[in-house]
Image (tube, rainbow, N blue to C red):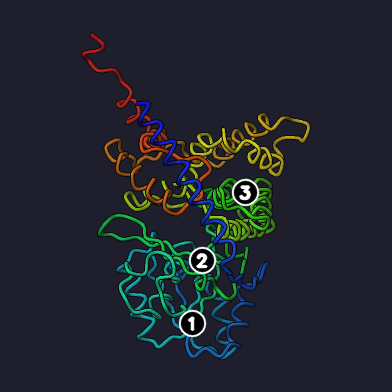
Amino acid sequence: MITDMLSDSVRAAGLGALMRGAGLVTRFIPIPQPTLLVGPGSSGRLGQAIAGFGHSKILIVTDSIISKLGLLKPLTDALSAGGANYVVFDEITPDAPIPLIEKGIAFYKEHECDAIVAFGGGSSMDASKAIAVAVSNPKPLRQLAGYLKGLRAPVKIYAVPTTAGTGSEVTVAAVISDPETHKKLVIVDPRMVPKMAALDPSLMTGLPPHITAATGIDALTHAVEAFVGHWTTGYSDGMALTAVGLIFENLRVAYNDGANLAAREKMALASTYAGFAFTRANVGYVHAIAHQFGGLYHTPHGLANAIMLPYVLKYSSPVITERLATLALRAKVGTEDESSEVLAQKFLDAVDQLNRDLGIPTYLAALKESDIPALAKAACWEAHTGYPVPRYMSQDVCEGIIRQALPPAAAKVKTAPSRKKMA
């Protein structure tokens, strides 16, 4: 036991040093930022701008619901008025599976497009980025997973997010799902960042409350994990703190009053600012675990993050007390005359309360005890090979963290004494 503890300690120290070193390198990698158009009607203004760029034909990537609701109309009307040709690929489904993306690639080539507008939630954004990379670098998508695997620059992308959560309109990554392995693949390339993006709150007023909640906590997770990890910069800290403040001020309002344009706009900005933060400072165990939930159970990413955020934060809290205290002040759940320890606990409590107010469950209904070892192994591998986490987990610790998200019935079975012990 002592040997195992020493081994974990030494490994954690080595991984921590490696990630800090990687962070010093990544802060010098140039990451482009899109031109942002913000406010009601901005999707139409984006269409006007794109129409003037001289593209021969634009591929709009979205899902069937958005298409049927008519949310594309301001953009497409503006494109048509400006003389721009476009086609719509509206078959995107959650998790953006590889076969569907391959279909999108074929659609792009068939219609001889030369630019993409990503229109929708995270899946549409991720699919668009994957298509853009694959069109320029014709090789299997699995071979494009990882950092800068494409030699040629992706085709130009423009973005119109319809949820306030992923921040994908400003990030360097695309997460897609591999149905053969039931895992998520991540494609990373700074050149995938969209050239322009429209944050149009009028497109978000019809979002159901549960989606508003999950995507909002997704944005919070991006900001918090970026703020407490080891790759922080002054810039990422500023963006993360601004996002946290906006989320605590506006997420409950947007959840309870979906038609509130002011709250929707501020949540859209919060999502983008959080995207700026984690693009530079990266994420941590919450995402590592959530990706495994998504790959195996097809759990929506925002919901998976929302469930795991409190558990991971509480585990990490002993080594991020000062950071949590700063977050508490920005969230306005404490005052400067209180100790760091008190403030840190207040922030943890505030996250719990926010989840409760938004109807976020404390467990994942699909989670099975028998899956936990494999989930933990994959999560640790993802985190330890790419994320600047503040406090490392062993395999056993990660299993314990995930086990807290077991549904009540499964948890009771796990903890119930055996008949032999009861006798």
Badge 2 density bin: few <14, some 14–19, many ≥20, Cα 10 Å: many
Query: Farthest residue toward the right?
Result: 337
First-in-chain label (1 vs 3): 1
Q: Residue placed at 49% from the left, 88% from the top? A: 85
Give me the disc on residue 172: 2
Badge 3 is on which residue? 251
Residue in the foreground of this view, choosing between 253 and 141: 141
The quadrant of the picture occupied by the N terminus is top left
Q: Residue at x 68, y 53 (%)?
A: 242
2 vs 3, front mark: 2
Which residue occupies the foreground of this view, 239 or 380? 380
Q: Which mark is residue 115?
A: 1
Q: Which comes before the other along the chain, label 1 or label 2?
A: 1
Q: Position of residue 4 (x, y in %)?
A: 36, 31
Q: Is residue 406 visible?
A: no
Residue type beneath disc 2: Val
Question: Element type at marker 2?
Answer: loop
The type of residue carrying mark 1 is Ala
Q: Residues within 10 Å of mark 3 (few under 14, many from 20)?
A: many
In terms of depth relative to the viewer, which is nearer, 298 or 15? Answer: 15
Is residue 147 shown above or below 156? Answer: above
